[in-house]
């Protein structure tokens, strides 16, 4: 158990404040669950953001990971757990940007994190919070990135780690979880995964580091705020530009909520005066439908098999809807073929091979420019959450299919139409 302290929690809808140490906090606000039948994730009530705090953070060593920004985070420990996460590159996309007629399109490359995913920002904060609370173990439900990341940070913090995953989880992801020493359990259905976590949290003092309830509520608020550092770094990396939109692959909305809160801090401190639209890039269209109907319908939606398994949730969360709405944002859903086409586009035009879930954001950006959601003089950042090497087999199949189609039926194709990038026809 590390000495430290955690900020208080509060429900953003009804302002209920639970005890920080209450093991049931992973269920979200009990009042909202009872009143409107929707679990609402708590927010961590950090101290006010100030320009002085940002100035001091900028002067600190970027190799401190997210803890460079500790005065703006809700987790404080004498021994924060870090693997040097964060401080990831922001890369201008000249190739895809030109195709989309985008003036200023950037990619935040979160594959540069220690376990090659943005989840490391959440894990550093959530596992440190668990150590401050004296949890007996950390536990997460995950198909891959989240579980592998939590497992790595648990190893770093010398904590026991339990992951509940699906029996069909990709072998690469399962190996990643196991190599860090996590105890990995496979289940057929979501509810079974969450039931194991609920029992462990209530009876054995495990600390849930992911969504762990049904209907979903999202990850623990202390972990969600780890994503605030993405907004801070974007401000640092684009100091003289107003960012018009940030496009984020979205399932349960931890990341988009964290980024929204990061920009809230920047405005509160008076260091920026703009409010970027947050655009949720999704595969099943559930956020889009709820936004159109002005409802809090979180699903479940009918789903289909998708290569974007990291965001293949049949439900979304209140926090995801709230983050998008509060910034005038939108949601864009894309087809399966567009995802894999965008993955290849980005690799061939800009030299970046991202995971399929990140390619959802690439495809969504292209679609948003075509539909007028984004304007061609906008400054746009898309968040790329992980590397294509998490699932190269699917890419290999897609490339082979394209080659077969090209060989068979492309007698009138020009070389540029048959080289695997034809879908970016904007
Ligand atoms: Zn509430």
Image (cartoon, rainbow, N blue to C red):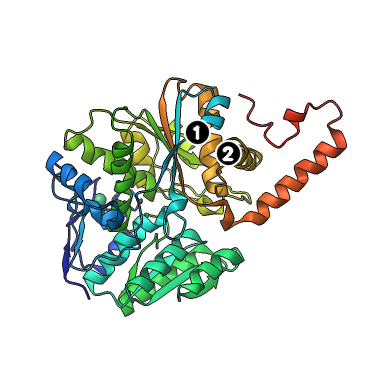
Residue 284 showing in the rendered view: no
* Residue pictured at 48% horizontal, 62% vertical: 142
Quick one: label 1, few (<14), some, or many (20+) residues within 10 Å?
A: many
The relative height of residue 122 versus residue 22 in the rendered view (above or below) is: above
The relative height of residue 111 versus residue 210 in the rendered view (above or below) is: above
Q: Nearer the viewer, residue 149 or 418?
A: 418
Count of numbered marks: 2
Q: Is mark 2 within 8 Å of ligand 1?
A: no
Q: Nearer the viewer, residue 425 or 162?
A: 425
Q: Is mark 1 within 8 Å of ligand 1?
A: no
Identify the image quadrant of residue 292: top left
SS label for mark 1:
loop
User: Which residue is labeled 1 in the image?
Assistant: 93
Estimate the spatial distance between the alpha carbons at disc 2 and disc 1, rounded to whole Å: 8 Å
* Residue pictured at 20% horizontal, 47% vertical: 59
SS label for mark 2:
helix
Tag 2 near tag 1, CB within 8 Å: yes
Q: Earlier in the sequence, mark 2 or mark 1?
A: 1
Residue 21 showing in the rendered view: yes
Estimate the x, y position of residue 129 in percent, counting from the top left.
Answer: 26, 65
* Residue pictured at 66% horizontal, 40% vertical: 337
Q: Nearer the viewer, residue 33 or 253?
A: 253
Q: Nearer the viewer, residue 307 or 390?
A: 390
Estimate the x, y position of residue 302 in percent, counting from the top left.
Answer: 58, 47
Quick one: label 2, few (<14), some, or many (20+) residues within 10 Å?
A: many
Estimate the x, y position of residue 331 in percent, counting from the top left.
Answer: 46, 35
Query: Which corner quadrant holds the N terminus?
Result: bottom left
Say whether residue 375 is left or right of residue 136: right
User: Which residue is labeled 2 in the image?
Assistant: 346
Say whether residue 190 is left or right of residue 421: left
Estimate the x, y position of residue 262 in percent, counting from the top left.
Answer: 27, 43
Query: Which corner quadrant holds the C terminus?
Result: top right
């Amino acid at each position: 158990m590390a000495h430290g302290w955690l900020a208080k929690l509060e429900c953003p809808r009804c302002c209920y404040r639970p005890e920080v140490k209450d093991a049931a906090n992973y269920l979200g606000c009990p009042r909202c669950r009872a009143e409107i039948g929707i679990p609402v994730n708590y927010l961590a009530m950090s101290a006010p953001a100030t320009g002085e705090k940002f100035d001091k953070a900028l002067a600190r060593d970027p190799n401190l990971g997210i803890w460079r920004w500790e005065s703006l985070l809700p987790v404080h420990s004498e021994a924060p757990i870090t693997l040097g996460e964060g401080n990831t590159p922001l890369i201008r996309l000249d190739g895809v940007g030109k195709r989309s007629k985008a003036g200023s399109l950037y990619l935040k490359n979160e594959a540069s994190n220690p376990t090659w995913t943005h989840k490391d920002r959440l894990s550093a904060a959530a596992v440190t919070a668990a150590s401050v609370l004296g949890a007996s173990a950390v536990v997460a439900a995950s198909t891959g990135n989240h579980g592998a990341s939590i497992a790595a940070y648990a190893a770093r913090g010398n904590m026991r780690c339990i992951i509940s995953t699906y029996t069909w989880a990709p072998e690469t992801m399962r190996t990643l979880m196991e190599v860090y020493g996590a105890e990995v359990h496979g289940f057929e259905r979501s509810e079974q995964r969450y039931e194991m976590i609920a029992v462990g949290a209530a009876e054995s003092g495990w600390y849930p580091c992911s969504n762990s309830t049904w209907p979903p509520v999202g990850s623990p608020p202390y972990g969600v705020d780890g994503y605030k550092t993405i907004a801070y770094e974007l401000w640092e990396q684009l100091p003289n530009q107003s960012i018009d939109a940030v496009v984020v692959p979205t399932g349960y909305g931890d990341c988009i909520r964290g980024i929204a809160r990061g920009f809230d801090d920047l405005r509160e401190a008076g260091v920026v005066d703009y409010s970027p639209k947050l655009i949720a890039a999704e595969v099943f269209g559930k956020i889009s439908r709820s936004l159109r109907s002005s409802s809090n319908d979180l699903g479940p939606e009918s789903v289909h098999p998708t290569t974007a398994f990291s965001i293949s949730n049949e439900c979304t969360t209140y926090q995801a809807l709230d983050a998008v709405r509060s910034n005038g944002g939108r949601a864009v859903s894309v087809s399966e073929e567009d995802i894999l086409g965008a993955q290849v586009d980005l690799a061939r035009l800009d030299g970046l091979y991202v995971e399929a879930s990140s390619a959802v954001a690439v495809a969504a950006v292209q679609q948003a420019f075509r539909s007028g959601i984004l304007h061609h003089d906008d400054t746009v950042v898309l968040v790329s959450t992980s590397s294509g090497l998490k699932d190269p087999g699917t890419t290999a199949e897609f490339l082979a299919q394209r080659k077969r189609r090209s060989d068979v039926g492309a007698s009138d194709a020009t070389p540029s139409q048959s080289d695997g990038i034809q879908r970016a026809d904007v």
